[in-house]
Image (spheres, grey):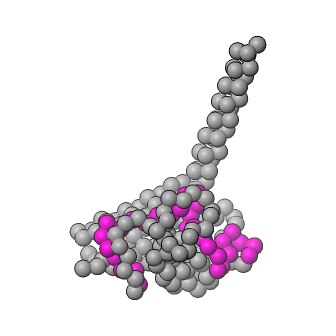
Amino acid sequence: MKSKALILIAVLLAILMLIGVYFNHAMRLKSPVVENTIATDTQEISVKYCSPSVRGRVVFGDEHSLQPFGSYWRLGANEMTTITFSDDVMIGDHAVPKGTYGLYAIPYEDAFEIRLNKEHDRWGYSEPDYTQDILREKVETYRRDQVVEQLHMDFEEHSSNSIVLMMEWEYYRWYVPIERLN
């Protein structure tokens, strides 16, 4: 009798594990992990994010949208978006020491406030500790005519000392200029 109970418990645990694996896999398929890196003669920068899709939703807008203007946005799904700098850089008027940072934004209709935070290993929607922000920089947004279905981030090299992180999703595109120090 005792061995039947143990077998039943083992079967139930195996079923629960399979359900967990299935849901984890399904979430990752909806928002796949993307990592883009740019390496120049003088530096390497990488961004890692989970790329959600529009899927017919209104992404940016009022309080009924997926991402309301003026509210915290983790710049992706699932895990916190991170950016890693191999060397010290400048973003706007802000010196940023080399290292890995959490990257998030506060979107507005005509600009996104890009923020870097010392915390970079969080999962889920929870807001960061804002006192750990090392950078808050507003960047202009550009309205697109066609929907960009999946969140996309990539780098464009302007010179050996100048790189731009281009981000786009739904009807919006925005650029974060990055300059190497020294």
Is 74 located above or below residue 68 in the figure? above
Q: Where is residue 105 in the image (x, y as percent from the top left)?
A: 55, 74
The mark tally for this picture is 0
Q: Which residue is drawn at 49% across and 65% down?
A: 119
Foreground residue among 99 and 156: 99
Residue 167 visible from this viewpoint = no
> Which quadrant: the C terminus?
bottom left
Q: Position of residue 1 (x, y in %)?
A: 76, 13
Does 168 lie within the magenta span?
no
Compared to residue 24, the image places residue 103 above or below, namely below
Task: Name the residue rendered at 61%, 73% in the picture.
Answer: 72
Going by the image, does 171 lie left or right of 182? right
**Is residue 102 toward the left or the right of residue 38 in the image?**
right
**Magenta segment range?**
63-92
The quarter holding residue 96 reads bottom left
Q: Main secondary structure of the magenta part?
A: loop
**Residue 137 in view in this figure:** yes
| Residue 11 percent coordinates (x, y) | 69, 25
The residue depicted at 66 percent of the width and 61 percent of the height is 55
Residue, x 34% and y 69% (percent of image)?
98
Q: Is residue 119 left or right of residue 54?
A: left
Residue 80 in the figure: left or right of residue 20:
left
Q: In this view, does 108 lie above or below 48?
A: below
Above or below, 19 relative to 11: below
| Residue 70 position within the rendered picture, expressed as x and y whole percent measured from the top left | 64, 80
Front residue of 59/77: it is 77
Q: Is residue 65 magenta?
A: yes
